[in-house]
Image (cartoon, rainbow, N blue to C red):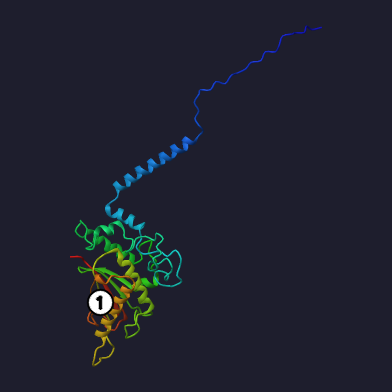
């Protein structure tokens, strides 16, 4: 028979000693990660500012301040801007739609009314290049359709940037022999008027027509070319183009041909010239 022990069982207690300080959870890690991310973005910005030219930086700024409005809602038309809707500048519902005459960019404000910067015209030359790109649909914010682009040709001359708006075989800009503009001419006027806000240069409007297939006692080409130029001037002003920027409105009849065939429809054209500042 075994012996019975009256000894009490031994109980060992392990006391957890606290250091008195806690890490208060992991929230500090989130804050630290945000700080590191912000610092990385800051140094990348500093590097980009140092690695790009002034022209490249201006291009980036213009991208975020488009001068041709992008309609958030289609107006249902087939023109270069999809028709007019409640978000067009005419209705003054801007909703942050970018730079315009009433919301100019900082660079635009700094140049004043003359359009000449401290670089003695370098900025103006760059703006004419930007204007040309807008008219030819080369920018991401442009909504120029293929139908409209078929009627636009640009070239740079000693006089300035020449924008040619011309007839095609299947789509004239004016009713035959008259100064009545077609819907295509009206769409082109909208495009030029709104794009012209990029620059402050003076503008000349010139009308040209093709030669008549028969010899007439009284050549109407002078009257038609002049009246067409006046109609385009009025269309531009109706779309917000300032009358004070107009330098001249002239008609050249059939004296300055674009096509060697005097009767070619390509000779029916309107030239809008953004004149170089002197």
Give the image quarter of residue 272: bottom left
Q: Is residue 98 visible?
A: yes
Q: Is residue 267 visible?
A: no
At horizontal 29% and vertical 50% (from top left) the residue drawn is: 52
At horizontal 24% and vertical 91% (from top left) the residue drawn is: 218
| Closer-to-camera residue (117/158) | 117
SS class of the residue under badge 1?
strand
Give the image quarter of residue 137: bottom left
| Residue 76 image offset from top left, x and y in percent | 46, 71
| Residue 256 image offset from top left, x and y in percent | 23, 79
| Closer-to-camera residue (169/243) | 243
Residue farthest along the right direction in this orientation: 1
Is 22 displayed left or right of 219 in the figure?
right
Image quadrant where one finds the N terminus: top right
Image quadrant where one finds the C terminus: bottom left
* Neighbour tally class for label 1: few under 14, some 14-19, many 20 plus, Cα within 10 Å: many
| Closer-to-camera residue (218/228) | 228
At horizontal 43% and vertical 40% (from top left) the residue drawn is: 34
Residue ID for mark 1: 206
Is 204 displayed left or right of 13 in the figure?
left
| Residue 22 image offset from top left, x and y in percent | 50, 28
């Amino acid at each position: 028979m075994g012996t019975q022990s009256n000894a009490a069982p031994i109980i060992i207690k392990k006391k957890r000693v606290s250091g008195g300080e806690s890490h208060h959870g992991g929230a500090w890690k989130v804050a630290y990660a945000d700080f590191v991310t912000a610092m990385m973005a800051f140094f990348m910005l500093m590097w980009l500012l140092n690695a790009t030219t002034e022209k490249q930086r201006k291009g980036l700024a213009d991208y975020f301040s488009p001068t041709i409005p992008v309609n958030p809602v289609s107006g249902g038309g087939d023109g270069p801007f999809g028709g007019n809707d409640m978000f067009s500048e005419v209705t003054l519902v801007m909703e942050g739609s970018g730079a315009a005459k009433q919301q100019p960019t900082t660079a635009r404000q700094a140049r004043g009314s003359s359009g000449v910067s401290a670089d003695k015209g370098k900025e103006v030359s760059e703006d004419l290049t930007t204007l040309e790109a807008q008219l030819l649909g080369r920018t991401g914010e442009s909504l120029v359709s293929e139908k409209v682009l078929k009627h636009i040709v640009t070239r740079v001359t000693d006089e300035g940037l020449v924008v040619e708006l011309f007839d095609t075989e299947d789509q004239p800009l004016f009713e035959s022999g008259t100064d009545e503009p077609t819907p295509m001419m009206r769409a082109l006027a909208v495009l030029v008027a709104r794009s012209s806000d990029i620059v402050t240069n003076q503008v000349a409007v010139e009308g040209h027509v093709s030669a008549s297939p028969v010899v007439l006692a009284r050549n109407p080409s002078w009257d038609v070319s002049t009246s067409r130029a006046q109609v385009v001037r009025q269309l531009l002003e109706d779309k917000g183009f300032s009358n004070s920027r107009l330098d001249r409105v002239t008609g050249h009849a059939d004296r300055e041909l674009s096509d060697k065939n005097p009767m070619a429809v390509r000779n029916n054209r309107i030239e809008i010239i953004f004149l170089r500042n002197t």
